[in-house]
Image (cartoon, rainbow, N blue to C red):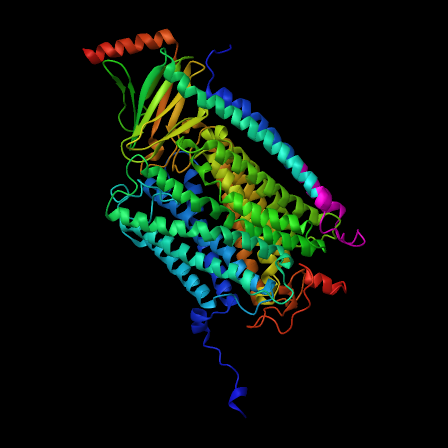
């Protein structure tokens, strides 16, 4: 299934693979070289230690290779960052986007669906509130905190954002598949930080619209 | 009998420990103090790992756990690895540059006592009714404000960090001044040993970074009583920005000296001079120090309020400096005549394990990847691979290498290798699973995790690993006692080392040197042995 709307998870996955491979290759090269040197140059086998102190040409060449690899990684990172950065303005311009206020407070999350009347999703402390979202549609979040720093994190979407008092931070996510996405506060926020969970429940768009309409009626009535 | 000939009377040992301005005495006491704090911080870690072995709360309460992780991080960073780095520098830099003393010996002594006093103030929080600081090792506002974290423990935390950091800063400045102003005739800048150069990189960063933390702690202390420095839309950002301006360079303060130590160890046990000395000096000591003072914002990618591209660019730039450092260290093994001492093996393991930390550091330097990794166990794994699997192993390489110089006696090699074997297994069991836990969504600073998460097995492995580490440390303590009780005397130069500290007795006399060999390169003792001097 290809999705029209890019999501943070696919952007992350497309970059992560390259970084893992580069890391594994570098670790392999260093490990093999060190072990080979330790075996080959152990005392008593070799006649006299080498005397090369400076090898500027070799080191410069090596530096160039490093710089090329580094530039490649930076290029890939910047490209992925461009894609992430486009998500929020795109959602802000998308009339179909769902707009949700995220409020973090010690030690619970609240979600408010914009529109009239406002629909609020809460839960008693200790149980995770449900963040109901439509699959495949852009969701624009406006986050703030009522007390200390919190951090909105959905590990399955590979994305987090800090929220703090007197400031509204915007970010956009898209939920690629229906299902339950565990969410949590990733910034230590005091005594019951570990209990500050929520669950994002992604449902088909039609089902979401029906749910929201039902809730609005309930809120109005 | 003339008055002049009467020997100088040394003060009684206790008084001597209080007021001696001999850099070796100051450094020895600092090493001892950081070892004591290390054991304390280690017990805190074991308590945390015991709690996390299974889902549910079995051992400590959430509140105690929050105090434990705050104080574990604070103890290890402010009171163990930073002072350990500086103690190595305070002991060795004057010797390595051929000086009879440290620059500003009374300033260094003041710095030592401030560090001790700050450490006592910080840990005194355990004795207060409400317990010690509980607002993480970065003491982040607004959580650390009075109404959010009440109690005198948090105040003691702030003052302790302020005082200890001020003391460490003073000692760092004395080390820098020693290297710059107290070198022996012939000891030009480009003849200073690699370890001394890494201390220069370290202390150059400290000039700018440490005073910022001292002032920030003053501001936070003020803010807890008055208002509103860290309120408003910019407040929490300002705190993070100021903290990480200290907090990132300090990571390298806790790393460079061990790179330098391992460079010396590789050189000595490979029987050859450091490979690529010039590149090593410019990359590790200077380029690395400049870059690591320019990357603090990468701790704030998830705020969305900093220039992510600039900090990603600078952070990736560290690959160049670190890559050169690795090239030169491994190059020193090339065509060497390698003796497999405990110190060398600790150095090799340092190199490989730190690489895991370094490569995962490249991972979190990319904002796209850090948007997930930040504040997860991926980060916990990353920085423990740098600070524990890296720096602490480098510290043990340094301890096994220089212990004969400090005491005149060897540590036991057999016990050292046993310790290394236990610690390698324990370290990787403890920290490798954390990468998987973090990637799977486990956040840090939690006393408990849901049973349904399925993280129990990996956490149990990590906990068993942490007990193995403790067993390794125990072997080291036994080694320390055995080696000091039943001394195996070491001469002035037991390893055939490259630099000047091996040109004097072990331990060196109060004035360090009776005579200095000619200094014509950065490895004057190797010159001497090869008849080149």
Please provide percent x and percent y for residue B454.
46, 28
Front residue (pair B496, B228): B228
Residue B338 is inside the magenta segment: no
Position of A75 relative to B283 (above/below): above
Image quadrant holding the N terminus of chain B, namely: bottom right
Please provide percent x and percent y for residue A101.
30, 22
Position of B373 relative to A217 (above/below): below
Q: Residue furthest right?
A: A47
Left or right of B478? Residue B441 is: left
Front residue (pair B22, B97): B97
Position of B117 relative to A125 (above/below): below
Quarter of the figure with residue A150? top left
Residue A41 is inside the magenta segment: yes
Quarter of the figure with residue B89? bottom right
Q: Is residue B249 visible?
A: yes
Q: Is residue B53 visible?
A: no
Quarter of the figure with residue B70? top left
What's the magenta region? A29-58
Left or right of B522? Residue B249 is: left
Please provide percent x and percent y for residue A173.
41, 20
Image quadrant holding the C terminus of chain B, namely: bottom right
Front residue (pair A15, B15): A15
Left or right of B187? Residue A192 is: left
Please provide percent x and percent y for residue A63.
65, 39
Counting the numbered discs, the total is 0
Q: Residue at x 48, y 21 (%)?
A: A83
Front residue (pair A33, B67): A33
């Amino acid at each position: 299934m290809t999705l029209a709307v890019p999501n943070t998870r696919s952007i992350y996955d497309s970059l992560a693979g390259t970084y893992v491979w580069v890391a594994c290759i570098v670790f392999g090269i260093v490990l093999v070289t060190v072990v080979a040197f330790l075996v080959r140059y152990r005392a008593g086998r070799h006649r006299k230690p080498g005397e090369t102190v400076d090898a500027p040409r070799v080191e410069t060449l090596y530096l160039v290779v490093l710089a090329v690899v580094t530039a490649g990684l930076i290029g890939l990172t910047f490209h992925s960052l461009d894609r992430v950065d486009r998500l929020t303005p795109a959602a802000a311009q998308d009339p179909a986007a769902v707009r949700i206020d995220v409020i973090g407070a010690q030690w619970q999350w609240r979600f408010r669906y914009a529109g009239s009347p406002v629909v609020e999703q809460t839960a008693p402390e200790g149980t995770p509130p449900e963040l109901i979202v439509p699959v495949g549609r852009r969701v624009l979040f406006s986050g703030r905190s009522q007390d200390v720093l919190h951090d909105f994190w959905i590990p399955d979407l590979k994305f987090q954002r800090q929220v703090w008092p007197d400031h509204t931070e915007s970010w956009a996510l898209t939920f690629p598949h229906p299902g339950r996405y565990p969410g949590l506060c990733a910034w230590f926020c005091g005594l019951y930080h570990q209990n500050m969970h929520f669950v994002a429940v992604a449902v088909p768009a039609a089902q979401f619209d029906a749910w929201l309409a039902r809730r609005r009626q309930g809120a109005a009535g | 009998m003339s008055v002049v000939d009467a020997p100088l009377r040394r003060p009684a040992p206790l008084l001597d420990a209080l007021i001696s301005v001999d850099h070796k005495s100051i450094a020895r006491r600092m090493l001892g103090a950081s070892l004591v704090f290390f054991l304390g911080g280690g017990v805190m870690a074991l308590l945390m790992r015991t709690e996390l072995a299974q889902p549910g709360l079995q051992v400590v309460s959430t509140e105690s756990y929050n105090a434990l992780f705050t104080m574990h991080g604070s103890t290890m960073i402010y009171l163990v690895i930073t002072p350990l780095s500086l103690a190595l520098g305070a002991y060795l830099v004057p010797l390595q540059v051929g000086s009879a003393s440290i620059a500003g010996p009374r300033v260094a002594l003041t710095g030592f006592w401030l560090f001790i006093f700050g450490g006592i103030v910080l840990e005194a929080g355990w004795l207060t009714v409400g317990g010690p600081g509980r607002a993480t090792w970065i003491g982040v506002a607004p959580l650390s404000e009075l109404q959010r974290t009440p109690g005198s423990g948090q105040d003691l935390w702030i003052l302790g960090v302020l005082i200890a950091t001020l003391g460490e800063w003073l000692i760092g400045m004395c080390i820098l001044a020693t290297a710059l102003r107290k070198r022996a005739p012939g000891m030009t800048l480009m003849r200073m040993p690699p370890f001394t150069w890494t201390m220069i990189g370290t202390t150059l960063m400290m000039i700018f970074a440490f005073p910022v933390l001292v002032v920030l702690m003053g501001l936070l202390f003020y803010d807890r009583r008055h208002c509103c420095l860290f309120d408003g839309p910019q407040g929490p950002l300002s705190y993070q920005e100021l903290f990480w301006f200290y907090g990132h360079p300090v990571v390298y303060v806790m790393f460079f000296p061990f790179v330098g130590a391992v460079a010396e160890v590789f050189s000595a046990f490979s029987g050859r001079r450091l490979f690529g000395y010039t590149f090593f000096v410019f990359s590790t000591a200077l380029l690395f120090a400049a870059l690591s003072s320019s990357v603090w914002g990468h701790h704030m990618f998830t705020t969305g309020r900093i220039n992510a591209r600039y900090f990603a660019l600078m952070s990736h730039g560290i690959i160049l400096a670190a890559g050169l450092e690795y090239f030169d260290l491994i190059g020193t093994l090339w065509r060497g005549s390698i003796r497999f001492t405990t110190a060398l093996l600790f150095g090799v393991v340092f190199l490989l394990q730190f690489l895991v930390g370094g490569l995962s550091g490249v991972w979190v330097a990319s904002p796209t990847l850090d948007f997930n990794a930040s504040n997860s166990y991926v980060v916990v794994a990353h920085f423990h691979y740098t600070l524990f699997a890296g720096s602490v192993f480098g510290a043990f390489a340094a301890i096994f290498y220089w212990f004969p110089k400090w005491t005149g006696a060897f540590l036991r090699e057999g016990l050292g290798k046993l310790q290394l074997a236990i610690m390698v297994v324990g370290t990787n069991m403890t920290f490798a699973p954390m990468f998987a836990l973090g990637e799977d969504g486990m956040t840090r600073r939690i006393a408990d995790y849901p049973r349904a998460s399925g993280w129990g097995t990996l956490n149990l492995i990590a906990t068993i690993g942490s007990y193995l580490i403790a067993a390794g440390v125990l072997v080291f303590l036994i080694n320390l006692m055995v080696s000091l009780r039943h001394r195996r005397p070491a001469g002035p130069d037991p390893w055939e080392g490259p630099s000047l500290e091996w040109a004097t007795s072990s331990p060196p006399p109060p004035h360090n040197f009776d005579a200095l060999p000619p200094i014509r390169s950065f490895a004057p003792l190797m010159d001497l042995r090869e008849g080149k001097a």
